[in-house]
Amino acid sequence: MPLIDADGTPINVEIEGKADAPVLVLSNSLGTNLHMWDEQAKALAKHFRVVRYDQRGHGKSGVPDGVYSIERLSRDVLAILDALEIQRAHFCGLSMGGMTGMWLGCHAPERLDKLVLSNTAPKALGPDAWNARIQAVRANGVASIADGVMGAWFTKEFHEREPKKVAWIKEMFSATPLQGYVGCCGGIRDMDQREAISQIKVPTLIIAGRQDNATPLSAAEFMASQIAGSKLVVLDAAHISNVEQSDRYTATLEEFLLKN
């Protein structure tokens, strides 16, 4: 589990699968870490060299001061690829990870083979909502908003059916460093990639949750309309669809990434 330097910030990376297999980078959402991908990594390591990492401010990665722009988060990915001497990779990011993927698709397409943008949006909530969230967690801690976030991240049916999985993600969320969470909130607040994504030319899969209120289906449909040749798949899930519909999500990735 190496720590890779990204302009002075250590980024925690975990690698699974054969060294000579095609590379797949998995990028976590705001308020989680690389373990959100545990089910996918276990299955996909049979086909790929799976590179998971903790976005800066999350998990075991460094937590520098200030706002973490989406460009900064994306350059962390380029630092990982450079350090591991990987020229090209598939990239799959969920929510904030998908925002990172959009930037890479626009600004570093030569490093990508295929791109998966999952449960994400090129423009998030308005700045007032993000400022209110930042203020709330600064006052009371990240864990103080965990129950509300879990209510948005998973459907009522999933809460009832899989309470242990919800508790696992809630614990992960609550453990996110305060400055890391706030730094990423600022970057999401300041992001607007609505015009830029029309530049994406790499093969792109967009995954949406039919019941996702955090990054709604309308955002996914907009991305699909802007990214030429992209494919949209809608899962019966809320925001963290790779956990709520784990098997279907993994099969969707395999179908897209393994197809020539």
Image (cartoon, rainbow, N blue to C red):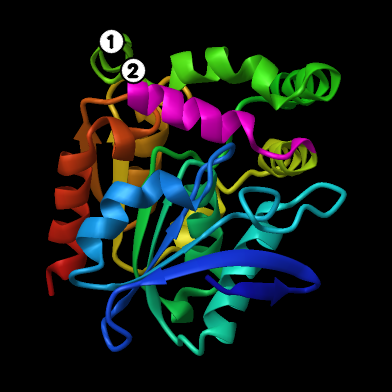
Q: Nearer the viewer, residue 7 or 169?
A: 169
Q: Secondary structure at mark 1?
A: helix
Which of the labelled discs sits on residue 163, or is there none? Answer: 2
Give the labeled residue for mark 1. 160
Query: Would residue 215 be visible to someone looking at this image?
Result: no
- Evaluate if marks 2 and 1 touch, with contact meaning CB atoms under 8 Å apart: yes
Indicate left or right for 61 with 157 as reference. Answer: right
Q: CA distance from mark 2 to mark 1?
A: 6 Å
Is residue 5 a member of the stretch shown in magenta? no
Q: Amino acid at mark 1?
A: Glu
Which corner quadrant of the image does residue 204 belong to?
A: bottom left
Which segment is the magenta one? 164-178
Residue type at tag 2: Pro
Q: Nearer the viewer, residue 133 or 198?
A: 133
In percent of width and height, residue 67 lies at 81, 47
Locate residue 164, reporting x and y percent.
Answer: 35, 23
Examine the rendered structure and indicate whether residue 57 appears above or below residue 242.
Answer: below
Would you say 257 lies left or right of 133 here? left
Comparing 66 with 231, the one in front is: 66
Q: Predominant secondary structure in magenta?
A: helix
Q: Quadrant of residue 258?
A: bottom left
Left or right of residue 192, residue 161 in this image: left
Label 1 environment density (alpha carbons within 10 Å; few <14, some 14–19, many ≥20): few
Identify the residue shown where x is 57% and y is 68%.
77
Residue 28 relative to residue 76: left or right: left
Q: Quadrant of the C terminus?
A: bottom left
